Every structure is written in C-alpha cells, then in structure tokens.
C-alpha cells in the first residue's frame, strides 16, 4: 500500500509542468564549471558565512558585469549545499533557453525540486497540487504561496535541517522585466516562514529592473555584493590560476615543451583579460581547439592585443572577432569567402535569435541550410559555441555575451559578421510559417478517429509526426513576429497561413501538450493586429 501511495505521489508531482533544464546539475549543464580550488576564496567564505550564520538578510544578491564569473560562483554554491543536503532548489535562467528564458515555470520548478530534495515536504507539495489542479494557469503569486510558502510553513522544525538554500542565477536573462520585479518581491516573502529558514542566493547583471525590484525591499531584507568591485589584484590572482590550470592541460594534451607558455605570457594574458573570466575561458577554448596549432593560436591572441589596454569589453570583442575571422580560411577565393560569410551570419544569427535552442539537424531544416554546410560552418566555432558530439542535443552559447556582441553594431564593427536582430526575427517568422505550412495537416498523428486522449498517444509518435523544428515553429512563430515589428496586412503571409492552417496549428499544440501557449499566442497575435491597424491608419 505504501509503495502504491509513493508511486501515486511521484506521478502527481511529475504532472506539474516544470523546466527540466533549470537546476544547476541538469544534464544540459553537466560540463559547466565550478570555481577552481584556491579561487574566489574570500567571496565564497563570505557567502557561506551568510548562508550558515545568523545574518538576518534573506537574500544575497551577487551582481556584476557580463563575464565576471557570476554563474560559475552560483554553480559552486549550489554544488556545495547540494552535497550537504541543504540545497532546496536552483533555477539558472538563460536567454534563448526555452523554459529557462522566462518566468512561466519558475515557481513550479522550484516546488518540484523542493519536494524532491526535502523528503518531509513531498506530501505537502503533492497535497497542494491535488487541491489546486489548475495551479499552473494561476498567477505567479498564487503559485508561490500555494506550492512553496504554504507547504514549507507546514514543515516541523525538528524534521531534518531547518535551513535551506535557494540559488537563482542570471535573473537579468528572464524575458519580461515586469516578471523580474514580481519574482524579487515573491522571493522576499520567504521572510514570512517561521520554522524553516530559506536563504536565497541570487545573481544578475546590475540592470534597472532588478535594481528597481530590490529598491522595493527593505535594506534589512537583502545584501548586495558587487562582483566587479573586488580588488583587481584578487581577481587577477584567480584568473592567473585559471589560465595556469587550463593552459597546463593544453600543454599536456599537445605534448608541448614543459616551459610552454611560461609565467611571463600567463601574466600578460591576465592583463588582457582585464578582470573578465569569460575572456580567459574563451581564449583557452580557442587555443585548445587549434590542436597542434595551439601555440600559433596563442600568438594570434597576442597579435590582436598589442595595443594599449582599453575597456575589458573591448578585449572580449577582439577575441570574438579573432575566433570569427579564424573560421573563414584565407585560402578561399573571394566568391567562396563571400558565401562563407553569408552562411556564418545566417547560422550564427539564427542561433543567437532563437527563443529555444535546437540541435544541428533541426536548425538546418528550419533555416534551409544543409546539415553538411551547418556542420562545416560551425566546425571552427567550438570556443564560443557548445557543440555536442551527440548531434541530437541542442547547440548552446558558452556565454550570453557573444549574443550581445553579435547583435550590437557598436561592438561587432566588422560588417561581415553583424546581425540585424529585427530582420533576423522576420527571417525566422518566414521560415517557421514555411515549415508549418508544409507539414501541418488535419489528424497529423494519423489516428483516423476522434476522441483519442493526448495521454494515450506515445511521445515517439508525436515526435515522428511533429519533429523538433516543427514544434519550435508552432511554439515560437508569433513571438518572432512580435520581435520583428512587422506590419500585418490582409492577404499577407500570416493571414494566408491562418486561413489555411489555424485549426491544424491548434491541433499540433494540443499533441505537444502546449494548449496554454496557444491562448497566449492568440492574444499576442490580436495585439500585433491592432498595432498594425493603428500604424496603417495613422501612417
């Protein structure tokens, strides 16, 4: 009987839609690093002292510029408390990461992890799900109170540990500014818990929506630590250890001389990094990917940085430019170079503009570029892209700063690589509508009958009928349309698609178990239509 009850509770908990990639130790994050031994020593000591001590501040806000190592520190903190069985939950936001790029599944993901990590909480969370079967469609506030705060308030102080850590990384990458402010407010409400103490470690860039959100909380409610204000000598020491470790690994792998690259060169690289760990990490990946040409690639970085030291961001931009230029062979003819630059812009532009990552095969199909051309174009870009050996896994950026670089003309000054974000969204709208128009049809899963429940159809059958690229198109074409700022018109592309395929599209979303997204999408489409009509009449 006990076993059947536990099985029932497990099924109930799994029925709550949550973001699979949210936790720090999700499969997709398995290769992301934690802090090396003897680095970030004082900062981690301060974080652990806050988490373990009697400090009244509920939230520790670690803020810093892009590339200063916030996510690596967050993973280190999460790993430390996971090992101690005191990690309540973690949520690592990622722009363009699908479910982890917005707040829709934030609370449910936290609730599911809390129930799994705190055995005594499991029953209380499941009771809340049973009591509120529509909880997924309620406001973030209702979800937070019913799925997190109320179950936690029912825990007995004597039941295991009474102190847990919640890690939230890169809150600035949450899609809607209004939701960022809501989340900060909700997180601050954990102070209402009496018998259980929930500490919240949060990282972000110091952007306006987050600063505003914290301004609404009393100063006693949180403490902020500005990462880029740490003494440069301490940061340089940590970057030195990082470079020494990674270049030492390259030296061993390539059987280079024991003196390579030498202390003088490492110290020079530390100066070029200018406090940015992401510069050091990208440089090491770029050198490593050169294989037997690793020393030559190290020289290339030197050649590109002989000028006087300037702002750290300039050096990061320079290494991104170096990587991109290296991807195009100087031995190509002018026509071959032009074709290669076009492919590079098309493929990289799509990757940084997608709202959820795709594998190489799905990406190639969606943007109508052969898989062979895509593979060859990306082959020299492992230092800025996470390109899995298993090509069924999605492509991801190593760091969001590359997206910022590629979409900003003031940073990416080489017109051969520049990507116009608005035009890229329009291109993706066209590609999404084209692929949906080709594939979508009535009874797409081939069931030849009515009344079949979604639960009765195997996932493999749905995947066969609706490949990943088609599912992506169904889910995100309207969001791309919003971001393209296109004007809609009668008998235009969107109008014709909806006339022919509206019901087919809704059926597809139903098989994907994404009907709630259809409601949002139709509301968004109505707003776009009203804006287009206003522009038409006012123009």
Image (cartoon, grey):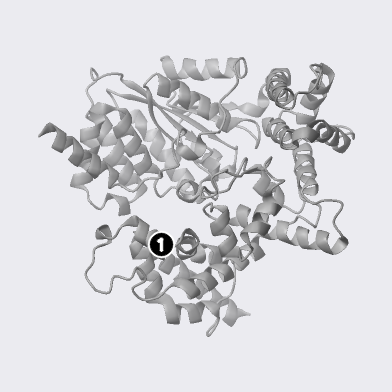
Q: Which residue is mark 1?
A: 464
Q: Is residue 483 visible in this depiction of the protein?
A: no
Q: Position of residue 396 (x, y in %)?
A: 58, 46
Q: Is residue 241 visible in this depiction of the protein?
A: yes
> Residue 135 vs residue 426: left or right?
left
Identify which residue, 474 or 198, lies in the foreground: 474
Q: Quadrant of the C terminus?
A: bottom right
| Residue 504, image quadrant | bottom left
Dot 1 crowding, Cα within 10 Å, few <14, some 14–19, many 20+: few
Q: Residue furthest bottom?
A: 491
The answer to whether 223 is drawn above or below residue 46 in the figure is below
Local secondary structure at mark 1: helix
Q: Position of residue 462 (x, y in %)?
A: 37, 61
The answer to whether 45 is drawn above or below residue 224 in the figure is above
Q: Residue visible at 56% across and 33% down? A: 32
Identify which residue, 199 or 493, lies in the foreground: 493
> Residue 285 vs residue 101: left or right?
right
> Residue 491 vs residue 125: left or right?
right
Q: Position of residue 293 (x, y in %)?
A: 80, 35
Q: Residue visible at 62% across and 32% down? A: 64
Q: Residue visible at 36% across and 47% down? A: 140
For the image, the number of numbered tags is 1
Identify which residue, 31 or 64, lies in the foreground: 31
Q: Position of residue 339 (x, y in %)?
A: 77, 63
| Residue 54, image quadrant | top left
Q: Residue furthest left?
A: 1
Identify which residue, 240 or 48, lies in the foreground: 240
The answer to whether 503 is drawn above or below residue 91 in the figure is below
Q: Quadrant of the N terminus?
A: top left
Q: Residue visible at 52% across and 29% down? A: 74
């Amino acid at each position: 009987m006990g076993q059947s009850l536990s099985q029932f509770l497990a099924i109930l908990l799994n029925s709550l839609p949550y973001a699979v990639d949210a936790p720090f130790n999700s499969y997709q994050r398995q290769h992301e690093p934690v802090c090396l031994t003897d680095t970030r020593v004082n900062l981690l000591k301060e974080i652990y002292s806050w988490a373990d001590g009697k400090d009244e501040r509920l939230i520790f806000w670690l803020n810093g510029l892009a590339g200063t190592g916030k996510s690596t520190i967050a993973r280190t903190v999460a790993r430390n408390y996971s090992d101690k069985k005191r990690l309540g939950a973690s949520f690592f936001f990622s722009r363009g990461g699908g479910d982890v790029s917005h707040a829709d599944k934030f609370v449910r993901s936290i609730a599911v992890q809390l129930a799994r990590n705190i055995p005594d909480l499991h029953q209380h969370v499941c009771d809340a799900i049973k009591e509120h079967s529509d909880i997924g469609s309620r406001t973030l506030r209702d979800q937070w109170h019913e799925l997190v705060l109320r179950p936690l308030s029912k825990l007995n102080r004597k039941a295991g540990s009474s102190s847990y850590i919640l890690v939230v990384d890169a809150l600035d990458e949450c899609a809607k500014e209004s939701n960022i402010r809501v989340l900060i407010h909700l997180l601050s409400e954990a102070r209402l818990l009496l018998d259980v103490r929930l500490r919240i470690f949060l990282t972000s860039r110091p952007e306006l929506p987050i600063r505003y959100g914290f301004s609404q909380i009393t100063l006693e409610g949180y403490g902020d630590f500005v990462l880029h204000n740490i003494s440069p000598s301490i940061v340089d020491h940590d970057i030195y250890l990082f470079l020494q470790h990674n270049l030492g690994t390259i030296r061993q792998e390539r059987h280079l001389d024991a003196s390579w690259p030498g202390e003088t060169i490492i110290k020079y690289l530390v100066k070029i990094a200018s406090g940015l760990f992401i510069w050091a990490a990208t440089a090491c990946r770029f050198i490593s990917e050169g294989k037997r040409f690793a020393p030559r690639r190290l020289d290339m970085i030197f050649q590109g940085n002989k000028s006087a030291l300037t702002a750290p961001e300039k050096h990061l931009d320079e290494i991104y430019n170096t990587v991109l230029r290296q991807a195009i062979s100087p031995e190509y003819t002018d026509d071959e170079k032009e074709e290669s630059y076009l492919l590079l812009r098309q493929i990289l532009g799509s990757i940084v503009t997608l709202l959820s990552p795709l594998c190489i095969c799905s990406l190639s199909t969606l943007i109508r570029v052969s898989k062979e051309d895509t593979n060859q174009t990306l082959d020299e870009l492992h230092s800025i892209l996470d390109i899995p050996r298993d090509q069924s896994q999605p492509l991801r950026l190593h760091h969001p700063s590359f997206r910022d670089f590629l979409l900003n003309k003031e940073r990416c000054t080489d017109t051969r690589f520049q990507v116009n974000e608005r035009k890229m969204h329009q291109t993706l709208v066209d590609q999404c509508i084209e692929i949906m128009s080709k594939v979508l049809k009535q009874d797409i899963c081939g069931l030849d009958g009515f009344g079949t429940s979604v639960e009765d159809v195997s996932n493999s059958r749905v995947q066969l009928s609706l490949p990943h690229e088609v599912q992506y198109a169904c889910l995100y074409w309207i969001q791309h349309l919003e971001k393209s700022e296109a004007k809609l018109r009668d008998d235009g592309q969107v109008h014709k698609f909806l006339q022919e395929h509206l019901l087919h599209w809704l059926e597809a979303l139903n098989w994907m178990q994404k009907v709630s997204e259809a409601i949002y999408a139709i509301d968004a489409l109505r707003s776009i239509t009203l804006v287009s009509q206003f522009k038409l009449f006012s123009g």
